[in-house]
Image: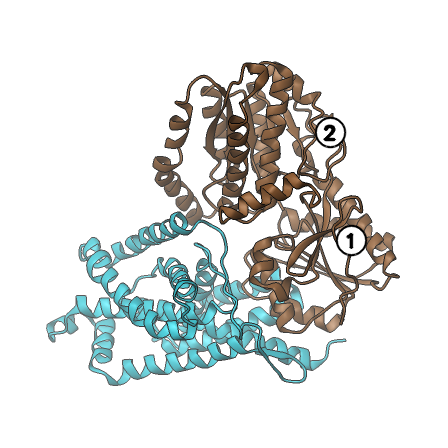
Chain colours: A brown, B cyan
Amino acid sequence: MSEQKVPLSRRRFLATTALGAAAASGTLAMPSILRAQGAGVKIGLLHPVTGALSYSGQQGRIGATMAVEEINAAGGIKALGGAKIDPVLGDAQSTPDGGTAEVEKMNAAEVSCIVGGYASSICLAVSQAAARYDLPYAVDVGVADSIVTRGLKNTFRFGPGFGVIAKTALDNLATINDQAGKPAKTVIIVHEDSLFGSGLAKLLNAQLPGKGFEILETIPHPTPTRDFNTVVLKIKAQNPDLVIPADYYNEYVLLARTMLEQRVRPKGIYSVLGGAASSYKFVKEFPDAAKYIMDCNHWFNPKSEKAQALKKAVEDKGQFFTYELYMNYNAVYLVADALEHAGSADRAKLTAALAASTFASPIMPYGPTKFVNGQNEGAAPANTQVLDNDIKVILPPEFANAKAVFPIPA
Amino acid sequence: MLSPLILIAAVLNGLMIGAVYALVALGLTLIYGVLHIINFAHGALLSAALFAAFFAYQKLGLDPYLAAVVLTPGFFVLGYALQRFVIGPASHGDDRNMLLVTLGLAVLIENALLYAFRADTRTIDLAYGFKSIDLGFTFLSLPRLISFVAVFAVALALWLIMSFTDTGKAIRAVAKEKLGAELAGIDVAHIYAVTFGLGTACVAIAACLLIPTYYVNPSAGNAFVLIAFTIVVLGGMGSVPGALIGGLLIGVVESLGGFFFGESLGQVGIFLIFIAVLLLRPRGLFGASA
């Protein structure tokens, strides 16, 4: 999930600005130290490391810096005589304006490229600001389709967009249901009421009936919602075969916990970009509530040795292997690969190299890379399910390391 | 399809969650009743208390209900010290300044938490976290039921303190007539701090009751404070029974509103009540006439 609501109350505004000031001493001092390493290729790593999205932003920064360290340790950019990547760290402060301000700073610091953004709203603002300076920009996560459909020549997204994810999710849901002998006919959708959840609910309402599902009810709720008992009572009263939640992490967890508490066990829980459904943290903390939940989301290729090695390295650091982390790791490698092909840190040459990139990520379950209008056409989401206290890939078949357990055994 | 049993289940849920709202509101109303200020730091203190309860479990293995025994006096002392040494002196004798100081404290506490613990959400998984009592037509969550009973115990204890102890009498005297109380030899600064301490202690108990079924992050407390403020106005500013009844009422309104109109609109019901009370009965259900 990559679009998050950032409520801008006065309190929040005060909080973020005050924090920005507080963080300035810690966060912003870092680039100057790192920059002092000498002549290298400067790459801006821009993430929302403070404010409402700070957890995701910090995970993203970890992934990006791990890739930079690896590349540098392996001899830097060979086409540039072994030039080291010189990361310029930036904090978008969880707001689009914060992202734009960092682009200005990074441009002044003469970076060759910017990687990151995380939330769609930030990616939209950053891509536009970077376009003014013809600065190539590699989007890490942001899934909003409009990020790449506005005709900006500088913006490249290696991962899949919302349209592709939603289509894959619906097709795969039908496949899973068909393979199990169509046990699921009725659906209740529970969604948070901002852009992400409402947009998804609208799409599901339009598409699911055509795939043989009857939608019993669509239940919106605000973020934050303190209590899900009423929602669960409604689900219980109608006893749907399938529950589809479209929520951010906290609400997703509360909903799953309340369903367990009220012994509501539908035949399946299926989500699209589910806030918690493909989170190791959720699985570790509430294995019983997370069990059998399916999700269609960004995910790594579990059969890749490289991905497993990275996962281990991240877990050894005491961090969860979240998608923010490896999406950023990939985005940095994409840029490094383009630098090798461009043979130059020049922005225009790098943009051309990115547009022609055929970089194959060893981590992701993607097809061959081909950028069309900045979008990697090979990018695809994966379907996951929580099985044996772990998150397994159940679709697409060529990357799957488990079979879908559906319907949930009684 | 709408069986009356579901409605009863919805009302029961409303009462359970309403009890916790009431406890947060108790602290707020107490401070308002005596100091005549809205404590803007209430939500941030609730977040801090949630973190304290979380770490008591995580680091010391202390069950949240046992942690309440330690955290309640701890937060009383914290609240006392905050009022005595920070809010009081910084207001330079003008009560209105306190309001701004508490707002500043809220920003400070929230960001200190954000800096120390980052924005990620933490939860604890207790053996009894998912225990529920089977009533035949619905399941009543055990932690919720415990908190329901505990809130009544706390309200009763507060009422006893306010009614029968010398400190309680002094608090009521200061609330009613500050200058008179001062002339009668009551240490007003001390009473202010005691009241603030009691309000903060309520927050600590609320945190320990919430953490088994809720989550903590640096802004988790804020979700409860707006609602607590509504309850304070509904019940009557400064009224202990008002906060209790108001909390339960708001809980039920939220639950039924959510059931009939959806969660998004269910919240609207709460604020419609808030506006209606301000228009028709500004002193609240149990408030003394202004």
Q: Distance from label 2 to label 1 (Cα)?
A: 32 Å
Kindly identify the residue that appears in the image at 22 percent across and 56 percent down.
B86
According to the image, label 2 marks what residue? A369
Q: Where residue A201 sits in the image (x, y, percent)?
A: 72, 52
Is residue B230 at all visible to an observer of this figure? yes
SS for dot 2: loop
Q: Chain of mark 1?
A: A
Indicate whether A113 appears above or below A234: above
Kindly identify the residue that appears in the image at 52 percent across and 41 percent down.
A57
Q: Nearer the viewer, residue A319 or A21?
A: A319
- Locate residue B206: give its quadrant: bottom left
Indicate whether A390 appears above or below A2: below
Q: Nearer the viewer, residue B251 or A196?
A: A196
Q: How many numbered discs, if any?
A: 2
- Locate residue A178: give its quadrant: bottom right
SS for dot 1: helix
Q: Chain of mark 2?
A: A
Q: Where residue A63 sits in the image (x, y, percent)?
A: 54, 38
Q: What's the mark number on residue B200?
A: none
Tag 2: amino acid = Thr
Kindly identify the residue that appears in the image at 59 percent across and 24 percent down.
A336
Kindly identify the residue that appears in the image at 54 percent across and 20 percent down.
A112
Tag 1: amino acid = Asn
Indicate whether B39 appears above or below A43: below
Image check: B202 left or right of A392?
A: left
Marks 2, 1: nearer the viewer: 2
According to the image, label 1 marks what residue? A205
Q: Where residue B233 sits in the image (x, y, percent)?
A: 42, 68
Is residue A3 at all visible to an observer of this figure? no
Q: Nearer the viewer, residue B89 or A153?
A: A153
